[in-house]
Amino acid sequence: MVEIPSKVKGTHFNLYKLEQLLEPMGYMIGGNWDYDHGYFDYKMDAENKGYHFLRIPFKAIDGQLDSRNCTVECGNPFILSHIYQIGLDDHAYTSNFTASFDQFSEPVDKDGMVPDEYVAAGKALVQELESNILPD
């Protein structure tokens, strides 16, 4: 994991409005959320052996994430690398029903080393994020 300092940290947004700003930029709410916190994930790249994400954490400060008009506070963005076992999913059949239970193979390393190229790309993405969601 590599943190990227950002002006986004500590800012407050209506969750629905924040989602409307981030989705067109390629961010999606990650599946790893709870009623009081979650993450917006930007999939930077998928290699043969893993995934690299820019992750924007957020926590509810007024309401719960599944409620209307929830206000969230953004945390500091970071890059996360997941390194997966090769070959486990090569011949797997996945229907919509089984996908809800078996989405990924077990990571070899849930917090793999982040290559320099992704750190540079992550910094550029954070600058783009700041210019698109923060007031001038």
Image (cartoon, helix red, strand yellow):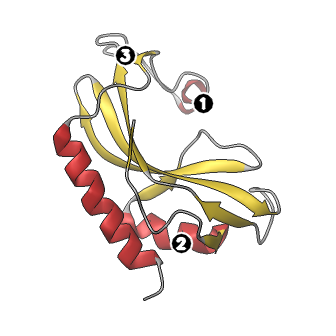
Question: On screen, 59 above or below 3?
Answer: below
Residue 133 rendering spot, x and y as whole percentages? 46, 76
Whole-angstrom CA distance, mark 1 to mark 3, is 15 Å
Mark 3: amino acid = Asp
Residue 4 rendering spot, x and y as whole percentages? 37, 52
Mark 1: amino acid = Ser
- Say what secondary structure mark 3 lies in: loop
Image quarter where the C terminus lies is bottom left
Q: Determine which residue is flagged by label 3.
A: 89
- Say what secondary structure mark 2 lies in: helix
Q: Determine which residue is flagged by label 1.
A: 100
Whole-angstrom CA distance, mark 3 to mark 2, is 33 Å
Whole-angstrom CA distance, mark 2 to mark 1, is 25 Å
Are the residues at dot 1 and dot 3 in contact (C-beta closer than 8 Å)? no
Residue count near mark 3 (Cα–Cα under 10 Å), binned few <14, some 14–19, many ≥20: few
Residue 113 rendering spot, x and y as whole percentages? 30, 27
- Left or right, 113 with respect to 61, comes to left
- Left or right, 47 with respect to 19, comes to left
Are the residues at dot 2 and dot 1 in contact (C-beta closer than 8 Å)? no
Residue count near mark 1 (Cα–Cα under 10 Å), binned few <14, some 14–19, many ≥20: few
Residue located at (54% from left, 21% from top): 102
In depth, the one of 104 and 50 nearer the eye is 50
Lower position in the chain sequence, tag 3 or tag 2: 2
Q: Determine which residue is flagged by label 2.
A: 20
Q: Residue furthest front?
A: 5
Residue located at (58% from left, 70% from top): 11
Question: On screen, 62 above or below 45?
Answer: below
Lower position in the chain sequence, tag 2 or tag 1: 2
Image quarter where the N terminus lies is top left
- Say what secondary structure mark 1 lies in: loop
Residue 57 rendering spot, x and y as whole percentages? 55, 51
